[in-house]
Image (tube, rainbow, N blue to C red):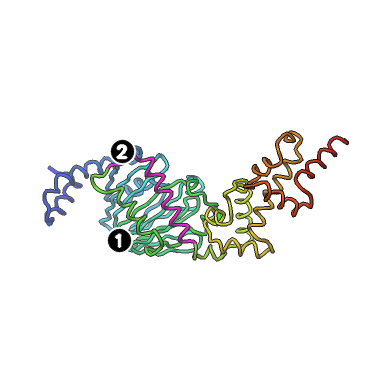
Amino acid sequence: MHSPYEDRICRALTFSAHPEAFSAALVKLTKAHRAATQPARLRRDAHVTVSISHDIDAWREVSTAHFVQLDCQTAASDFTATIDTQPLSTSMSVSRIQSGPVRIDRTARMATVDARDDLLMTVQLAGVGTVSQFNRTAVLQPGSASLYDPRHAYRLSMPRGGQDLLVLRIPRSSLGMTDTAIEHLGARPLTRTAPGMAAFGGFLAGMLSPGGSLDGVRPEFAVVTEQLLATVIRASLVDAPIARAEADPGALLAALRARIASRALDPTFDVTALARDSFVSVRTVHAAFEAVGETPGAFIRATRLRHAASELRDATLWNVPVHVIGERAGFRDASTFTRAFRKHFGVTPGDWRHDASIREIAR
């Protein structure tokens, strides 16, 4: 005697050209039934978990257990949804969802009560859906994707059946993006023709391939996932609205200056690295600084010089050679440091330190 869940599979396999899949389907279904009826006990730290829901209330519980607190609605009387999840770490997973028509809402209250540090990305495999957040809506065709932020309200709408999609859950810190950058990227479509998008979608789908195992290599795959997504985002933003400073130019400039303050002492840090780390184009970086009569290169150099000047006046560092102070401030060689310092302050680094020591003695 089969359960109602097994009967559904039996009816579906009646028309299958591969009846040998019957037993495998029943095994999968049994696991799914246990997961659907006990969503709180879903495992994210071992193997792929499978869950099947045959009503919207059960799907709400399963979706919340896998991602964040959500509300789900459907107009279909025979709604069915399946989710396969591959955990990569305690804070990262990739899931494949196949479902009937459904609308998923995360309200502002849910975002406040159920605060999360994750970011979510949907990659559409089949069907058409939308992602709405930050007063805009991204239409997702097969092969396209969109990022959205659980810290804010959002809506996912899949008005027709036959939905097949991937959902990536990833720590926001892993992308190194500011809240401003996330807001400008959220609910914007990454089309299938975006550089690297097809390869990234295929990589995610591959991790959920039947019979595949990531045992022993999950940490490595987590790192690769972060790197690939960051690469796709950087490439897509070169010509995106954020790269044309559609946002408040003042906010963009403030974010760029903050990034410089945190990275300027690295001698390899330059304008190209600033653009890459900020997920904007080099052209956008120059435009942001030109709007206030500056250049990004000069701002990086001035930040390094101010740091060096501070250390040269620090009595506890007077035993540190001047050229070492320059190196600590991000200058690759002593001559470049000396020239830049004299041009900026009107004296050499040595004279600057000497004047500071005289003032200290005179106290």
Quarter of the N terminus within the rendering: top left
Which sits in the foreground, 168 or 54? Answer: 168
| Amino acid residing under circle 1 | Ala
Tag shown at residue 32: none
Residue at image location 34% in from the left, 46% down from the top: 62
Q: Splitting the image into 4 quarters, where does residue 46 fall?
A: top left
| Amino acid residing under circle 2 | Asp
156 left or right of 306?
left
Residue at image location 14% in from the left, 44% down from the top: 23
Residue 58 forms part of the magenta stretch: no
Q: Splitting the image into 4 quarters, where does residue 218 fall?
A: top left
Which secondary structure, mark 1? strand
228 left or right of 164?
right
Q: Position of residue 286 (x, y in %)?
A: 61, 62
Residues shaded magenta: 213-237
Residue 229 forms part of the magenta stretch: yes
Quarter of the C terminus within the rendering: top right
On screen, 153 above or below 324?
A: below
Q: Position of residue 188 (x, y in %)?
A: 46, 62
On screen, 223 above or below 290?
A: above
Q: Main secondary structure of the magenta part?
A: helix
The alpha-carbon separation of the residues under discs 1 and 2 comes to 29 Å
Q: What residue does disc 1 label? A: 126
Crowding at mark 1 (Cα within 10 Å: few <14, some 14-19, many 20+): some
Which sits in the foreground, 126 or 334? Answer: 334
Which secondary structure, mark 2? loop
Number of marks in the rendered image: 2
Residue at image location 15% in from the left, 48% down from the top: 21
- Dot 1 or dot 2, earlier in sequence: 1
Crowding at mark 2 (Cα within 10 Å: few <14, some 14-19, many 20+): few
243 left or right of 16?
right
Tag shown at residue 215: 2
